[in-house]
Amino acid sequence: MSDKEKGKDKEKEEAKVEIDFGAGKISFGGLFKGLGNLIDLADKLKAEGVEKRGEIRGLPRGGKGVYGLSIRTLGGKPVIESFGNIRETARGPVVEEVREPIVDVFDEKDHILVIAELPGVTEEEIKIDVAGDILNLSAADTDRKYAKEILLPGKVKAQSLKTAYKNGILEIRLEKEK
């Protein structure tokens, strides 16, 4: 067997990482390869100097600026969403009082599941409004304020809204309109 063939066999073995949890084997090969590709992309962006700097205005005394990116794949394409309370304006970045939470939307067979991270607020402080295919989410206490308008993948029945909130994670389940 040539060195080239041995190398290909080794790659196939590495791609087939399987773990048996007692309920069948689960393969993680594609997951690890995807993470590797994401890390390579981040290194490339860093090497090419993709960076944003600037002065932050509007920071209230004792205030805190929060900014981040959420990267996921949707239909094989990367989707990048920002979150936090730093907004770009014509005059440069500005820190707002209201933060935009991290939100994931899952289009299931008969319902839509929305998961939002809202740390530091109680369930009673969360407000949810649904109109057609738009969900407005807001929450506020004395220290933190969150708000986000979420475009859902389809129209839902507003009266079917069910929520669960634990440890800063809000799950919203809505039945799809037929």
Image (cartoon, rainbow, N blue to C red):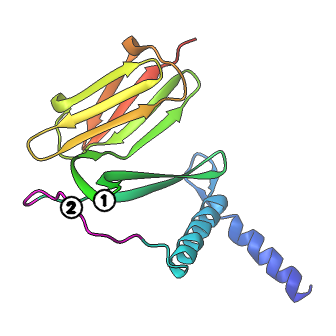
Q: Observer-nearest residue: 91 or 54? A: 91
Query: Which mark, by number, is residue 57?
Result: 2
Amino acid under label 1? Arg
Identify which residue is drawn at 64% across, 66% down.
Answer: 33
Question: In 3D space, how far apart are the residues under numbered discs 1 and 2 (Cα atoms)?
Answer: 9 Å
Query: Which mark, by number, is residue 91?
Result: 1
**Region rendered in magenta:** 52-62
Amino acid under label 2? Arg
Measured as percent of width and height from the top left, residue 50 is found at 49, 73
Label 1–label 2 contact, CB within 8 A: yes
Name, please, the residue furthest toward the right.
Answer: 1
State which tag comes first along the sequence, 1 or 2: 2
Identify which residue is drawn at 42% across, 33% down.
Answer: 150
Measured as percent of width and height from the top left, residue 53 is found at 35, 72
Magenta span: predominant SS is loop
Say what secondary structure mark 2 lies in. Answer: loop
In the image, residue 83 sits, relative to residue 116, either above or below, namely below
Label 2: few (<14), some (14–19) or many (≥20) C-alpha neighbours in 10 Å: few
In the image, residue 130 sits, relative to residue 40, either above or below, namely above
Measured as percent of width and height from the top left, residue 30 is found at 66, 59
Q: Is residue 48 left or right of 69 when viewed as pictured?
A: right
- Quarter of the picture containing the N terminus is bottom right
Asked if residue 55 lies in the magenta stretch, the reply is: yes
Label 1: few (<14), some (14–19) or many (≥20) C-alpha neighbours in 10 Å: few
Measured as percent of width and height from the top left, residue 36 is found at 59, 70
- Quarter of the picture containing the C terminus is top right
Identify which residue is drawn at 58% across, 45% down.
Answer: 23
| Res. 65 image quadrant | bottom left
